[in-house]
Image (cartoon, helix red, strand yellow):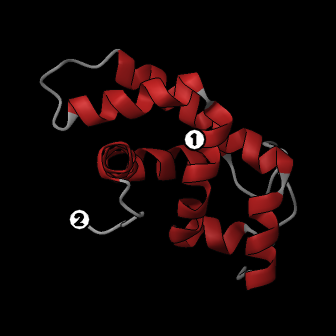
């Protein structure tokens, strides 16, 4: 079922959804902390993982708009909450976090180094 832009915006302000995204970011950060140095983009991935552990709330807010870049999440925004307490299953949230990890890790490092604005392109 398609959702409206208002429902999508409401999802981003939903405290339970924010906690769900934060939990997903923390789980992904743990995976990154345990990955090998040979993983492509490891240094940037590691920098952002550490930033998530230092301030998960801030990094969740940084990441949150990217959730709506995924058509599945956008479409689910108006659904009735399910087992996760939100309209979006944990597996869908985890997928978006994993899909956007490198883009956000690169952006995080760029902002730290140069104060660059967010760019989701390659």
Give the quarter of the figure containing the N terminus.
bottom right
- The residue lying furthest to the left in this view is 38
Q: Residue at x 12, y 24 (%)?
A: 38
Q: Residue at x 41, y 23 (%)?
A: 31
- How far across and how far down the image is residue 73, in percent? 62, 64
Give the structural element (helix, strand or loop) at label 2.
loop
Which mark sits nearer the N-terminus, 1 or 2? 1
Q: Residue at x 75, y 39 (%)?
A: 19
Q: Quadrant of residue 119?
A: bottom left
Number of other residues with Cα within 10 Å of mark 1, as a class: few under 14, some 14 to 19, many 20 or more:
many
Q: Which residue is mark 2?
A: 122
Whether residue 115 sits left or right of residue 70 in the image: it is left
Q: Quick one: 67 or 114, which is closer to the camera?
A: 114
Q: Which residue is mark 1?
A: 59
- How far across and how far down the image is residue 51, in percent? 48, 29
Give the structural element (helix, strand or loop) at label 1.
helix
């Amino acid at each position: 079922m398609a959702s409206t832009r208002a429902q999508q915006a409401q999802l981003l302000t939903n405290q339970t959804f924010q906690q769900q995204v934060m939990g997903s970011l923390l789980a992904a950060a743990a995976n990154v902390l345990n990955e090998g140095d040979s993983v492509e983009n490891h240094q940037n991935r590691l920098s952002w993982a550490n930033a998530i552990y230092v301030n998960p709330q801030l990094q969740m807010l940084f990441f949150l708009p990217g959730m709506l870049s995924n058509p599945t999440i956008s479409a689910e925004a108006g659904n009735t909450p399910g087992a996760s307490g939100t309209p979006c299953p944990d597996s869908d949230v985890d997928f978006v976090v994993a899909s956007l990890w490198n883009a956000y890790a690169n952006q995080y490092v760029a902002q730290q180094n140069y104060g660059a604005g967010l760019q989701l392109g390659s």
